Amino acid sequence: MIHKLALRNLLRNKRRSCLTSVIIVFAFSMMVLFMGLSDGGHKAMIDIGVRMGLGHIIVQHKSFSDDPSLQHLIVQPNQLIQQIRQNKPELTAVSRLRVDALIQAGRHGVALTISGVEPAKEVKMSAIADQRAITKGKTLAEFPQSKTFHHLDGIVIGETLANNLEVRVGDTVTITAKPASGADLSRAAFVVAGIFKTGLHELDTFWAEVPLHTLQALLGVPDQVSQISLYSLETPESLAHTTTQLQTSFNHVNISPWQTAAPELYSAVTLDAAGMYLLMLIVYVVVAVGILNTVLMSTFKRKKEFTMMIALGSRPSTVSKIVLLEAVYLSAFSLTLGLALGLWGHHHFATQGLDFKEVFGTAMEAGGVLLPDKFYSILDASKLSLSVLFVFLLTLVVTLIPAIRAGHRSPLAATQDA
Amino acid sequence: MITLNKINKVFADKHQSFHCLKEIDLTVKQGEFTVIAGPSGSGKSTLLNIIGMLDQPTNGTYQFDNKEVAKFSNNKLADIRREKIGFVFQAYNLMPVLTALENTEMIMEFSGIDKKQRKQRAIETLEAVGLGEFKDRFPAQLSGGQQQRVAVARAIAAKPLLVIADEPTANLDSRATESLLDLMVSLNQKQGITFIFSSHDPRVIERAHRVIHLQDGKVIRDEQLQHISSTHSPAAIPS
Ligand SMILES: Nc1ncnc2c1ncn2[C@@H]1O[C@H](COP(=O)(O)OP(=O)(O)OP(=O)(O)O)[C@@H](O)[C@H]1O
Ligand SMILES: [Mg+2]
C-alpha cells in the first residue's frame, strides 16, 4: 500500500514529477558522459605526452634539469638500465640523447632539437617512431641504416620543418652542433628517411630524430645519454610508488615521474580533473535541489492527508516512509534512465571516439601537448558506481527532514476543515 | 468503555486563554449510540478529539477500556486509534490517490491484517454501505454522500470498538443524511459498534439513544431517549 501511495502520488502531479525527472536524467547522463570523456581525454593526453618522448618515469643526471648541457649526461646508460630492470623487470627502458642544433638544407637553416634514439626500441614507445605518424617515407627503424648510397644515416623530421626547408624524402640535410669538448662545431649529413606529423607545433617544426650512436659520435659523447625513459603499464598510484623506490635505490641519478618532468602537462590534466569535480558538484546540487523541491511541494500540498493518516492511526514512520519512497522511486527511475543514457553516449564515444576537430573546428592543445584528433571515452566502474550511490544517498538525505516532518504532524488538523 | 473524569481543556497562547471544556464527567458504555449536541463553539469537537485520542485534556483523567490514556506513548495511541477506533470526519477525508476499496483497506493493512482477509472485509463493508459497485472509483469520482459512506466503511471495516464521527452529516443533503444514519444505526444494532458523534442537526439527534447537551464547555443535560425507529431498512450488514 505504501508503495502504491508513493507511486500514485508521483503520478498525481505528472508534470512536476516528469520535469524533475528530466532534469535529473539530463544532469546525470551529462555527468556520466563527461566523466568518460574527461578520463578518456586525460588518458589520451598522458599517453600522447608520454609517447612524445617523456616516458612514465624519467631518469636524468642530477644536474640535468638545472643545466641541460652535454656535461650532465648519464654515462653507460645500458649498465644502469640493466640494474634498474633487475630491480623492476616490468619496466621498459629507452635511452635518448638530446641537443640543440642547426639543420640546413640548401640555403635554408633552422635551429631545432635533435634527438638521438635507438630506433628499434622506440617503435612501441614514441609517437614519432610510429608508422601512423609518418606521412612520407619510413620510420628510422625501417630505414636501411648506413646502407644508402653515400652510407649516410637517416633522419626523420616534422612536416612543417620539411616544408620550411623545402626538402623531401631522400634529400640530404646537414646537422651542425657544438660537441661536448666545446671545440669547433661538428657537422654531419643525413638522408631524410621520413617525414612525420604529430599535430604538435613544437614537434612538427623544431624536432628531428637520428640514430643514437650517430649523434653520440657527432657530439663526442660515446655511451652517454641525456635521459632514460621508463615505460610502465602500472596505474598512476603504483607508478608513484615505483618511482620513489627507484630513487632510493639509485640515488646518484635523478628519477622523477612524468608529472614532475612535464609540469605543464600535469597541471593541465589536474585542472581538467578539477573541472570534472566541479561539474559533479553541480550535478549533485541539481539533483538534490530537484528532489527537495518536488518533495517539499508535494508534501506541502498534502499536509491534510498526512494528518488524516495519523489521525486514523498510521504510525509516523509509515507516513515518513511514503514520502521517502516517493523520492526513492523518483530518483531511482531518473538515475537509471540517466545512467542508461549516459552509458549509451559513453559507448558511442568509446567505440567511435570523439573528434576534436569536428567539435571545435581546431585541434586542442593542453599543457604543451596536443590532444589527438580523436580520443575515446573511458569510464571507471568504481568511480561511476560510487557517484550513483552518492546521488542516491543524497536524495534520501534531502528527503529525510520533510519526511520526518510529514510523519510528525499533529492529528488534530485532520478534524478541521480543509 | 469510556470514562471521563473531571476533564478540562484550556486553549492558551501568549495573549489569551480559553477554557473550552469544564469539568466534564462522562461514561459511555459499549454499544451506545450517542450524540453530543450543542450550539456552535460549545466544545463538541474538542470533546470528541479528546475521546478519539487526537488531543489531550489539560487535566482530568480519561480511561479507555479501563486503561489510562494519559500513560500511552504516541505510537501506542496511534495503534489504539488504528485498531479500536474508527473516525468519520466532517470533510470527506479520503486519500485522493486511492480507490474506495483501497481507502477502506488502508488502515487494515497498516494493522497487519493479511491481504485476502482485509480485501474481503473491505468489499463486504463497501457493499454494506451500498457502494459495492463503486469500489474501484477514486474519491473524485464519487458524490459527497458516497464519499462519506466510504469514510464510514473505512471507519468500521477494521471492526473497531468505537466509531467517532464529528458532524458526519454536515455536508450532506437530507436524503444522504437519512441513509447515512440508517447505516450507522444498523451497524450499531447488528454489530454492537459504539457510536459517538456530534451534531446540531435535529434529524440526527432524534435517531440517537442518548443525547448529551453541551453548552459553554459544560454538560447541561444528558438524556436517554426511548429507542426510536428502526423501520428504515438499510443495506444488508455482514455479520
Ligand atoms: N486550537 C484551539 N485554540 C484555541 N481555541 C480553540 C481551539 N480549538 C477550539 N477552540 C475554541 O474552543 C471552542 C470550542 O470549539 P469546538 O470546535 O469544540 O466547538 P464545536 O462545539 O465543535 O463547534 P461547531 O459546532 O462550530 O463545530 C470554540 O470557542 C473555539 O474557538
Ligand atoms: Mg465542531
Image (cartoon, rainbow, N blue to C red):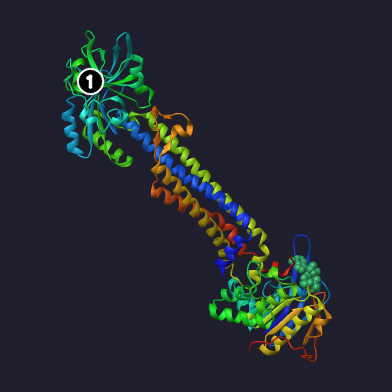
Q: Which is more toward the observer, A133 or A11?
A: A133
- The chain holding disc 1 is A
Q: Is mark 1 within 8 Å of ligand 1?
A: no
- Disc 1 residue type (three-letter): Gly
Task: Give the residue drawn at x 80%, y 92%.
Answer: B226
Above or below residue A11? Residue A81 is above
Task: Give the residue drawn at x 44%, y 34%.
Answer: A356
Which image quadrant is residue B171 in? bottom right
Quadrant location, the N terminus of chain A: bottom right
Residue topped by disc 1: A154
In this picture, residue B220 sits left or right of residue A205? right
In this picture, residue A92 sits left or right of residue A38? left
- Measuring from the top left, give residue A13's x and y in whole percent: 63, 58
Task: Give the residue drawn at x 39%, y 27%.
Answer: A368
- Measuring from the top left, give residue A328's x and y in whole percent: 53, 59
Task: Give the residue drawn at x 47%, y 30%.
Answer: A361
Q: Is residue B19 visible?
A: no
Above or below residue A102? Residue B216 is below
Q: Is residue A375 visible?
A: yes
Quadrant location, the C terminus of chain A: bottom right
- Measuring from the top left, give residue B57's x and y in whole percent: 70, 73
In this picture, residue B237 sits left or right of residue A279? right
Q: Which is more toward the observer, B199 or B120?
A: B120
Classify mark 1: residues with Cα within 10 Å, few (<14), some (14-19) or many (20+). Answer: many
- Measuring from the top left, give residue A403's x and y in whole percent: 58, 60
* Quadrant of picture, ligand 1: bottom right
Q: Which is more toward the observer, A325 or B135?
A: B135
